[in-house]
Image (cartoon, helix red, strand yellow):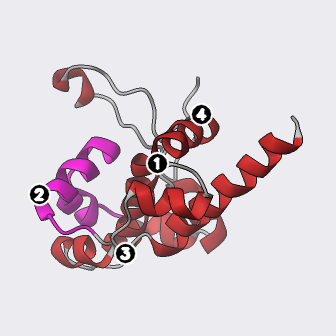
């Protein structure tokens, strides 16, 4: 890795930190790219190559992760949607279901005692959304949970 690669990585981390900190704000790729001191197209390519997902996918993962915590705490789906920066309840619910494999209201009504019994640092790691390769058709997608939450790791 040469000095230019290290500089690019530092710039990408700056943009990723922006997403982690400001996930509830309206963020778009040009804004993120400005923080990384890159053009939007170059930023998107570099971000995906480095982190394995597009900047928008990463942003939505952070929003869903925060929404999961709010839903576990008993917040309504609509309030959680707005609190994490999503403006469309339908889009939020669709994305949540796509990533989690269940609707936000089903997730909210589930028992979360295992997560609340864990130390916060462990719960944060165990409940973080993990994107896997999604099946192409919806019938197969309904059978696959794309997130492992507070349970034993699945065999790879």
Image spot of residue 76 (x, y percent): 20, 77
Q: Which residues are magenta?
A: 86-111
Disc 3 element: loop
The quadrant in which the N terminus is found is top right
Disc 4 and disc 1: Cα gap in Å?
A: 14 Å
Residue 40: numbered disc: 1
Image spot of residue 64 (x, y percent): 37, 59
Crowdedness near tag 4: few (<14), some (14–19) or many (≥20) residues, C-alpha within 10 Å:
few
Disc 2 and disc 4: Cα gap in Å?
A: 30 Å
Task: Give the foreground label among 3 and 1.
Answer: 1
| Residue 21 sits inside the magenta stretch | no
Task: Give the foreground label among 4 and 1.
Answer: 1
- Residue 52's image quarter? top right
Disc 3 and disc 1: Cα gap in Å?
A: 18 Å
| Residue 90 sits inside the magenta stretch | yes
Crowdedness near tag 3: few (<14), some (14–19) or many (≥20) residues, C-alpha within 10 Å:
few
Crowdedness near tag 2: few (<14), some (14–19) or many (≥20) residues, C-alpha within 10 Å:
few
Query: Which residue position holds label 3?
Result: 25
Disc 3 and disc 4: Cα gap in Å?
A: 25 Å
The first of marks 1 and 2 along the sequence is: 1
Disc 1 and disc 2: Cα gap in Å?
A: 27 Å
Query: Which residue position holds label 4?
Result: 49
Residue drawn 42% across and 26% down? 133
């Amino acid at each position: 890795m040469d000095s230019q690669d290290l500089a690019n990585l530092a710039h990408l981390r700056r943009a990723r930190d922006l997403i982690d900190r400001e996930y509830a704000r309206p963020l778009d790729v040009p804004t993120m790219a400005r923080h990384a001191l890159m053009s939007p197209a170059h930023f998107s390519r570099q971000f995906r190559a480095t982190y394995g997902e597009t900047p928008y996918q990463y942003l939505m993962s952070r929003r869903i992760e925060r929404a999961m915590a709010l839903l576990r705490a008993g917040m309504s789906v609509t309030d959680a949607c707005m609190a994490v920066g999503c403006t469309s309840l339908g889009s939020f619910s669709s994305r949540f279901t796509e990533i989690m494999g269940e609707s936000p209201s089903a997730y909210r009504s589930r028992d979360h005692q295992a997560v609340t019994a864990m130390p916060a640092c462990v719960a944060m790691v165990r409940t973080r959304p993990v994107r896997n390769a999604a099946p192409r058709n919806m019938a197969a997608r309904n059978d696959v949970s794309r997130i492992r939450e507070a349970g034993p790791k699945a065999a790879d």
